[in-house]
Image (cartoon, rainbow, N blue to C red):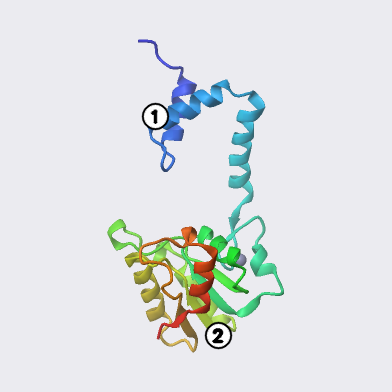
């Protein structure tokens, strides 16, 4: 049986390590790229290079940004007294899309998952606590996902903020438990923001 070339095997190997892409899909994408024009294929390579070289985390809220501070942290019209805590940048995008929130964010870059060895030090929790202590924050809205791990993460943060004179609220459970923020409809997210409940 004929062997694929080293480069072809290399690309299949790299692609098959991406989430949700098995060996079969990796092969399909590789053959597609082999047939595509050089410009088309290299545009993909360039796009990957650009995100890796230009995109970083906002040094204040850990949103994705191409500058030190993200667009939201730089926006003087935002309400500086409220921080909405989310797991991932995509959750922030989902809440922004509702247009119902004008405060700041804090992206945890994950959720606590002790079984997968994801502990507080792997998230941006310490930076959040520091913000609450040094900025004039009046309310923290916990918008972690309504899953066991999301709830556990919110509870952990709440305990860490025990002594801080700040109001802590949680998104109302318009979102079915277990569903993920990024897939919730705008209306539903908007409702759960306006109907948020006190967490302590
Ligand atoms: Zn930011």
Q: Looking at the picture, how far across and down is residue 74, in whole percent?
A: 69, 68
Residue 100: quarter of image: bottom right
Residue depicted at 59% across the width and 84% down the height: 136
Residue depicted at 46% across the width and 20% down the height: 6
| Disc 1, SS | helix
Q: Looking at the picture, how far across and down is residue 78, in whole percent?
A: 66, 74
> Does 184 sit left or right of 102 as displayed?
left
Disc number for residue 24: 1
For mark 2, does the 10 Å Cα neighbourhood hold few (<14), some (14 to 19), or many (20 or more) residues? some
In the rendered image of this protein, does residue 147 appear above or below residue 157? Answer: above
Disc number for residue 138: 2
Residue depicted at 47% across the width and 66% down the height: 124
In the rendered image of this protein, does residue 36 appear above or below residue 21? Answer: above
Kindly give the residue lying farthest to the top in the view shown. Answer: 1
Q: Looking at the picture, how far across and down is residue 145, in whole percent?
A: 41, 65
Q: Is mark 1 within 8 Å of ligand 1?
A: no
Kindly give the residue lying farthest to the front in the view shown. Answer: 187
Marks 2 and 1, Cα distance to the nearest angstrom? Answer: 51 Å
> Does 23 sit left or right of 49 as displayed?
left
Report ligand 1 position as a quadrant: bottom right
> Does 110 sit left or right of 36 as displayed?
left
Q: Quadrant of the N terminus?
A: top left
Disc number for residue 189: none
In the rendered image of this protein, does residue 37 appear above or below residue 71? Answer: above
């Amino acid at each position: 049986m004929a062997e694929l070339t080293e480069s072809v095997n290399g690309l299949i190997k790299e692609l098959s390590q991406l989430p949700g892409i098995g060996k079969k899909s990796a092969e399909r994408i590789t053959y597609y790229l082999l047939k595509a024009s050089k410009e088309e294929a290299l545009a993909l390579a360039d796009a990957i290079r650009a995100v890796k070289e230009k995109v970083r985390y906002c040094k204040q809220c850990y949103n994705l940004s191409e500058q030190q501070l993200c667009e939201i942290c730089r926006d003087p019209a935002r309400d500086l007294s409220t921080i909405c805590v989310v797991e991932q940048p995509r959750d922030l995008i989902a809440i922004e899309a509702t247009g119902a929130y004008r405060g700041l964010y804090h992206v945890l870059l994950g959720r606590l998952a002790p079984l997968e060895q994801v502990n507080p030090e792997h998230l941006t929790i310490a930076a959040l606590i520091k913000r609450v202590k040094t900025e004039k924050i009046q309310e923290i809205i916990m918008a972690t996902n309504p899953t066991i791990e999301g709830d556990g993460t919110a509870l952990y943060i709440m305990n860490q903020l025990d002594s801080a004179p700040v109001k802590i609220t949680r998104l109302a459970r318009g979102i079915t438990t277990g569903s993920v923020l990024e897939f919730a409809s705008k209306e539903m997210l908007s409702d759960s923001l306006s109907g948020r409940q006190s967490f302590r």
